Image (spheres, helix red, strand yellow):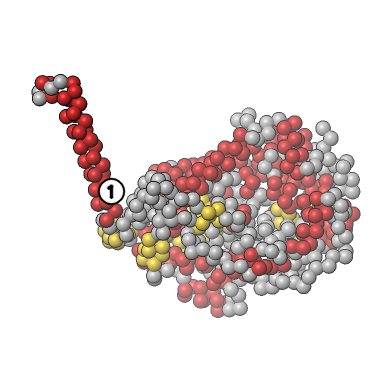
Amino acid sequence: MLLGRLSTRERRFVVVPLVALVFSFILYYQEYLHSARSTKSVPIVVSSSVSGRVDPQPVCVPPAPKRPAVLLSHTYRDDGILEVNPDGSHPIYELIELANARWKSKLSRASKTLDEAVREYEKRYRRRPPKGFDKWYEFIYSRSKDGRLSFDQDEYDQIYKDLEPFWGYHPLDLQRLQDEQEFHTDTFTLGTNETNQLEVLRVSFASGVNSWNPDDLLGGARSIIEILKDVEQDLPPFRAVISPHDSPSLFSDYEVKKMALDAASSNTYMDVDSIAIGPPNGWLSGCSPTSRARQGGSEQLSQQKTFIHDHRKAMDPCRHPYLLESIGEFLKHEHPGPSHRMLPRFAYCATLMHHDIQIPTLFAWVDDVLPRSDDPQWDQKLDERLVWRGSNTGIWHAQDTRWQKAQRTRLVDLARDLNGTVKVLLSSSTEDVRVGEGIEIPRGKVNPAMMDVAFAGEPVGCHEETCLELRRRYEWRRRQGSKESGQFKYIIDVDGNAWSSRFKRLITSNSLVFKATVYPEWFFDRIEPWVHYVPVQVDYSDVYDALAFFRGGLYGEDRREELARTIANEGRAWSRTFWRKEDITAYVYRLILEYARVMSSDRDAMSYDG
């Protein structure tokens, strides 16, 4: 009423100051609320029940960090590790965003025709595709999902990595080495016979009381024949020597492999019979003289928190020497001597220190988790702890072995430790808040609330005295069936004697998989960490931080569960689209085409001329 009696000019002098006063009050009140929240301790409640639900046992947490004017960048190291800047946002936001961009780019640039696939091949590998490439392309096109080609017609870099050193060998030398390998103990030779049918052509297994069951050792041969049965008629003549064991066995000498790759790059051949190499230096013989492992560089370059941004590089012991003291594959060989030749032999897996040619099998392969009722949808899974059950495989357990350092032992020890504290990065509800240094939380509170990790069954792979020690030292729970494990939202997958065969089943579920491994498997070129699974370091230093980001703190505060659900769903969709039985067939089919060519006396004649 009063304003109505005033002139327009008089109203302006009254209203403008009033608006400014109200606006100043709003700003002051918001700052007051933010300050109040920042000075209050946040109660965190710890679980004491089997499902990860919480009972009121508050733990005071330091005040949340204030928002800086500008969020700073994290450091992406060339060893595959992201180093966290406390004044940046939580790095997992960024890791997920970058990974999704890479994945979309990979899908969008995939070849869509045979001609495009040929051009992409020549661009990547600087040579023509192998003979039979057109037949191979017909196969993958006929098996494409819903009539649409996936990008797997391009993503076969692992085959290139495995076979490229052999391009630096003369074919006659390769054939001689292959002939010698056929008589190597504990191998079988698979190939085509006179009528071009696949069969086991030779078996060279040890005999005696402590030898393996030959029928068990030939399980891989039967699996590979099953994989190739639909393309058998189109395979070239070949003979492949294959190790029947889980682990790789061909340890590479760095200098020998470099000479082979240099010869391949220059289209020349190295003399395989007059190679001069230095004295053996254990596992370090597989590393470059300038590598961190050979230079004796400290693994702990920084006390900052870290995450994986490049999973393959994070698996490299030459970049991360601590791996040599953390994984059974390396621990069980004190001072191994490298091979002074690159030998053409296949295995079911390999680390970056080995040159076994990887050939996948159907071991533990599943099309789906069945019955589907054992794998509820994300929102119906009741347990929010990180789960793992398994045997104490990975290394022989005896007084003279370093089994305490092996990956599975360390995981169980980590989860059962109730002493001291662990520093954990907590998430924030938005990306525009600094992540901070993390907070110290008592292990006696965080482990029961966030971890359900234990050995299952009975001790295996151990000397009698050490078996008794293992039985006394650890709790041995019953094995989990798919229905029981299906109640957990978060599952961690770790290596055993070699690669983890359970990964296929886990990623096909509706749970989010955390994966720690040193084996870059055949499918690693076509899967994207942080899109389909969560990569974690083998020392488990980032496990609590990654888990807290997705599930929230002990009380579930500031959880990013929608991101966890998305990755779990994307992992399952990826498995059912890109890890079908026909995808394995396509990989092994192309591997055999490439292998037959590099072994041929006339490599040009074994190249595609379309």
- The residue located at (47%, 59%) in the rendering is 305
Q: How far across and down, in percent of the image, does residue 31 sit?
A: 27, 46
Q: Nearer the viewer, residue 544 or 172?
A: 544
Q: Is residue 132 left or right of residue 151?
A: right
Q: Quadrant of the C terminus?
A: top right
Above or below, comparing residue 69 to residue 57 in the picture = above
Quarter location, residue 578 = top right
Q: Nearer the viewer, residue 518 or 236?
A: 518
Q: Is residue 222 left or right of residue 78?
A: right
| Residue where numbered disc 1 is placed | 34
Q: Is residue 288 left or right of residue 3?
A: right
Q: How many marks?
A: 1
Q: Is residue 502 left or right of residue 595?
A: left
- The residue located at (71%, 56%) in the rendering is 347
Q: Nearer the viewer, residue 134 or 300?
A: 300
Q: Nearer the viewer, residue 594 or 366?
A: 594
Determine if residue 529 is in view: yes
Quarter location, residue 45 = bottom left
- The residue located at (32%, 59%) in the rendering is 62
Q: Residues within 10 Å of mark 1 (few under 14, many from 20)?
A: few
- The residue located at (57%, 37%) in the rendering is 104
Q: How far across and down, in percent of the image, does residue 120 sit?
A: 72, 37
Above or below, comparing residue 93 to residue 77 in the picture = above
Q: How far across and down, in percent of the image, does residue 195 sit?
A: 85, 43
Q: How far across and down, in percent of the image, does residue 201 sit?
A: 82, 53
Amino acid at dot 1:
His
Secondary structure category for the residue under label 1: helix
Above or below, comparing residue 530 to residue 213 in the picture = above
